């Protein structure tokens, strides 16, 4: 859920940046759909990072789900407010948000801060008994005899 909040925060930031670029530069409105792909990809990515950081495992799943829900909400808003129909642009936005969210989720899980240095798989590694005497010490003990 917090990943969606961050995704929409990035959407507001991206929309403001695109609006300022459109107003203050020579950018044409015809190139705007290409830039919206970038903004939606960044929103899905950062939403996925937050979702991945909050989950302990399967960051690709949580991030991809966050990206997909973000894309569906954006399309639903477009359908309800602008009376848009489903077209190829919408399918690209959904696929892009899903992919960016999954990549962000994988990144988020791997950059998660571990406060107590506990990883889900370390308990299996710690269960292996490692002998306290190394091979060098064994060799030295054999040569002394």
Image (cartoon, rainbow, N blue to C red):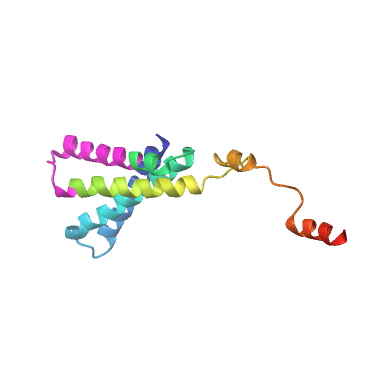
Tell me the quadrant of the picture where the C terminus can be found: bottom right
Give x and y (percent) for residue 13.
36, 49
Tell me: 94 left or right of 51.
left
Q: Residue at x 19, y 46 (%)?
A: 91
Q: Residue at x 23, y 65 (%)?
A: 26
Vertical placement of residue 23 versus 45, above or below = below
Q: Nearer the viewer, residue 139 or 105?
A: 139
Tell me: 75 left or right of 135.
left
Tell me: 92 left or right of 100.
left
Q: Which residues are magenta?
A: 66-89
Quadrant position of residue 59: top left
Q: Nearer the viewer, residue 112 or 58?
A: 58
Q: Residue furthest front?
A: 145
Tell me the quadrant of the picture where the N terminus can be found: top left
**Magenta span has 27?**
no
Give x and y (percent) for residue 100.
34, 49
Q: Nearer the viewer, residue 14 or 58?
A: 58
Vertical placement of residue 99 versus 80, above or below = below
Most frequent secondary structure within the magenta stretch: helix
Give x and y (percent) for residue 18.
29, 55
């Amino acid at each position: 859920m917090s990943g969606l909040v961050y995704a929409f925060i990035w959407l507001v930031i991206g929309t403001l940046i695109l609006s300022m670029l459109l107003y203050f530069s020579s950018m044409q409105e015809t190139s705007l759909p290409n830039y919206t792909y970038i903004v939606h990809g960044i929103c899905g990515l950062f939403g996925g990072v937050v979702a991945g950081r909050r989950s302990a495992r399967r960051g690709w799943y949580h991030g991809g789900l966050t990206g997909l829900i973000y894309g569906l909400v954006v399309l639903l808003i477009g359908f309800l407010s602008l009376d848009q129909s489903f077209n190829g642009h919408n399918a690209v936005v959904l696929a892009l948000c899903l992919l960016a969210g999954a990549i962000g989720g994988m990144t988020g899980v791997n950059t998660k801060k571990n406060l107590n240095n506990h990883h889900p798989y370390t308990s299996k590694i710690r269960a292996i008994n490692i002998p306290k005497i190394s091979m060098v010490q064994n060799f030295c003990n054999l040569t002394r005899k």
